[in-house]
Amino acid sequence: MTSYVFITGGVVSSLGKGITSACLGAILEARGLTISMIKLDPYINVDPGTMSPFQHGEVFVTEDGTETDLDLGHYERFVRTAKGGRHSNYTTGRIYESVIAKERRGDYLGATVQVIPHITDEIKEGVQKGAGDADICLVEIGGTVGDIESLPFLEAIRQMGIELGHDRVVYVHLTLVPHLSTSSEIKTKPTQHSVKELRSIGIQPDILVCRSEKPLPAEERRKIALFTNVQEKAVISAWDANDIYEIPSMMHEQGLDEIVTRQLGLDLPAADLHEWQAIVDANQNPTGEVNIAMVGKYMGLKDSYISLIEALQHGGIHNRTRVNISYIESREIEERGADCLKGMDGIVVPGGFGDRGIEGKIEAVRFARENGVPYLGICLGMQVAVIEAARNLAGLDGAMSTEFDSATPHPVVALITEWRDRTGDTEERSEASEMGGTMRLGAQAVTLQEGSLAARSYGSTRIRERHRHRYEVNNNYREQLSAAGVKFSGLSVDDLVEMIEIPDHPFFLASQFHPEFTSNPRDGHPLFKSFIHAVRKHNEGELPEVAQA
Ligand code: GLN
């Protein structure tokens, strides 16, 4: 029987509710429990797939190919048993879409369809599906208490508390406790008000997690407890950490996992946090450092690439190497040339959509290839590597992806429908046309060429990785590109290009899939571990072992 922990937020947004939820999942998992995690998002979009990364940060893709909120990435990075999927992220839009479809089908038998009970029932049903058979399901409610949009979600979790009882439901509320520098005072009033707001809709929090700059003094803790009707020991202080991987220990030391498990009547062994401590130790005591240039489009907003940034850091943790990332707008390379890449130890081109800055990315690849700088290309980062090789190694002038130039003389990257058309197979064409423009999403099997840099990095020739893209390398150009020196070292079961590399280079590897979605700090990810290792060795003047065939 699954128990539930609901996490709401108050005072302001961007308090790190996702990370806090993930860390709570981590310390409960460390007590031997299985955990599932759900994010409820109050916005009207049906899923985050079409939302601008500028506004909303990265779209995280789960194993089953669901495009979700980036918080699901935090969950998977912190909690091994929490595997996100279709039922792990619900938006208001998705809930309404489903209720309206039921109404159209006549499922409600003519009843007046209302927020309570129809919308709230739909939310509860969704939560139960997402919970699966985990011991504890953590449900994070996006937005801030008091927002109009979040009301139906709060009402649904209030009802669940009544239906399941106090020993199966825990409410955690995250607030901000600001420090006023002018008067050098810590202010608890916003927290008091936020809890009041929550109580006015019928939810009494069991635990408060108070975000603040510095640890909360005992006196403030007492005051908050008194005014919010929460036990003093359940007022947890979450101060600004230097390293997010310190947070599980910070919470555990204040007894957070014990408070939750006690309320749920669970008698469990002590939390084993040695893996988290090892990560913090590796971060604090690196034996070297590397400078990586990340060349992309949304460099002002790190949340757009959060999984990739994390995965590079995980690669650093597993090589005891500090990874410094310089975020370079590809436009800048177009305007001022690739000089800004000089002195960088490694170059990464991440995934992306749209043609802004595309030539700058191609230029960054050329710089990496010609100067022997380790290169890792992800998704679009592989496509630009193919374009660069086509133009500068295979002499295919004007080679491009049809995403950016539909009239290119050499569509080396194109929609399947576009390049399969050229085979003249009309039956296939019509079927493929139906599929034209659909996104390849989720985990698929990839076969790696024996002995390739890819296979040596993974230590295997059979892998599964997640995808999120529309365009594919045009197989009609494979022969020409191979002859020019591109090695197609990874292929899908349906013969699509998944990985390429350029031999005779210290490390030049790119993937059509997104390995960053499956990296976590405790295990790292083979590709990022291998890349950072190569960068470090290359930096120290040695040829990386992984590059020695
Ligand atoms: N825009 C490219 C495509 O759709 C790459 C997508 C990506 O990098 N995620 O194929």
Image (cartoon, rainbow, N blue to C red):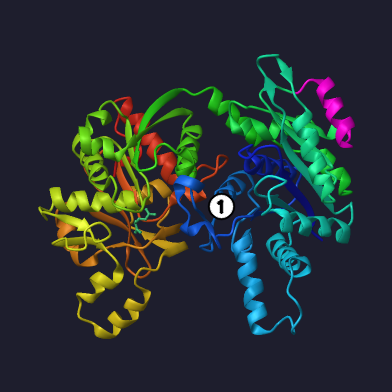
Q: Quadrant of residue 271?
A: top right
Q: Position of residue 411 (x, y in %)?
A: 20, 62
Relative height, residue 404 to residue 53 (above, below): below
Residue wearing tag 1: 69
Q: Is residue 298 visible?
A: yes
Q: Quadrant of ligand 1?
A: bottom left
Quadrant in which the C terminus is drawn: top left
Q: Is residue 257 visible?
A: no
Between 531 and 395, the residue placed more toward the observer is 395
Please report the bounds of the magenta region as a residue range: 216-231
Quadrant in which the N terminus is drawn: bottom right
Between 42 and 386, the residue placed more toward the observer is 42
Q: Main secondary structure of the magenta part?
A: helix
Between 490 and 69, the residue placed more toward the observer is 69
- Quick check: is 229 in the magenta stretch? yes
Relative height, residue 458 to residue 124 (above, below): above
Horizontal arrangement in the rendering, residue 449 relative to residue 306 (left or right): left
Horizontal arrangement in the rendering, residue 140 relative to residue 353 (left or right): right
- For label 1, the SS is loop
